[in-house]
Amino acid sequence: MNDMSETLIQTENLCKTFRSGKLETPVLFDINLHIRRGEFVAVMGPSGCGKSTLMHILGLMLSASSGRILLDGADAATLNETDRAKLRREKIGFVFQRFNLLPTVSAYQNIALAERIRRHRPDSRIQDVLDAVQMADRAHYKPGQLSIGQQQRIAIARAIVHKPAIVMADEPTGNLDSANAQNILDLFRKIHETGGMTIILITHSQMAAQAADRIIHLNDGRIEHG
């Protein structure tokens, strides 16, 4: 059973404003979140409401303009870029709407290359995750030889191969038809239930959000409820 008592991610009055010259575009306002270890959370809202920006800040790919974020006890404001990259590399797996697979190498090699970037030696764990996402028989296919649903399965396998504490998925069903979308959501549920990972699902889809245990509603850069 997942330990739901420990706070894994916490934000305090987090704000984000993008600046270009004298132009300022505020995107997030006073975001206060507590996400517990082992939770499956959906952040839901319309396009342009700040969901992806929030995910990039939670994933330490962007810095907040103000406020505080704690990730597994580490205060992001105290970390230099090297430490942020190390924490991100070790603790987080990312899944994106457009998959971001390298087109010239096989599914297996896409996962192995990600492991080398993390400075892990590729091993039998790759075969394990290919089995988990039901893609073992497509290990040596290149992305162009796979359906979009199969490509997303490989992207998920790449995200979880190093057993991250957190999986962040940005609109992972956005490019899929309803049948493939449901299959991917079922896969996230399976990963959550069997692997104990904390999953943060960014989506505009009510159907996708229903896969989570808790839904956080974001609108115009503010949390409405959740």
Image (spheres, rainbow, N blue to C red):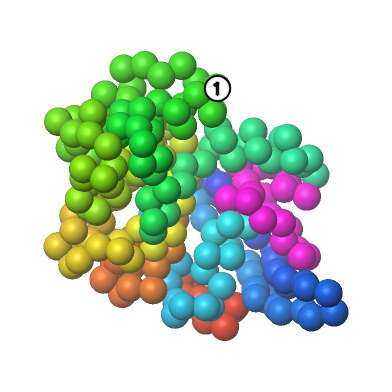
Quadrant position of residue 72: top right
Q: Name the residue under label 1.
A: 119
Q: Image point 24% across, 53% down: which residue?
A: 148
Amino acid type at image mark 1:
Arg
Q: Which of 92 and 69 is in front in this view?
A: 92
Is 93 placed left or right of 133 in the picture? Answer: right
Q: Does the magenta stretch include residue 105?
A: no
Examine the rendered structure and indicate whether residue 73 appears above or below residue 119.
below
Direction front: furthest residue: 104
Q: How many numbered marks are there?
A: 1
Is 81 placed left or right of 95 in the picture? Answer: right
Q: Image point 64% across, 70% down: which residue?
A: 31
Quadrant position of residue 129: top left
The local secondary structure at tag 1 comes to loop
Q: Where is residue 118? Give x, y as percent.
A: 54, 28
Examine the rendered structure and indicate whether residue 184 appears above or below residue 113.
below
Q: Where is residue 192? Give x, y as percent.
A: 32, 45
Q: Nearer the viewer, residue 39 or 200?
A: 200
Q: Image point 55% across, 22% down: which residue?
A: 119
Direction right: furthest residue: 22
Q: Is residue 153 visible?
A: no
Q: Magenta stretch: give its range.
A: 58-77
Q: Where is residue 156? Give x, y as percent.
A: 34, 43
Q: Image point 44% across, 80% down: which residue?
A: 46
Q: Where is residue 182? Give x, y as percent.
A: 19, 60
Examine the rendered structure and indicate whether residue 213 appears above or below residue 100.
below
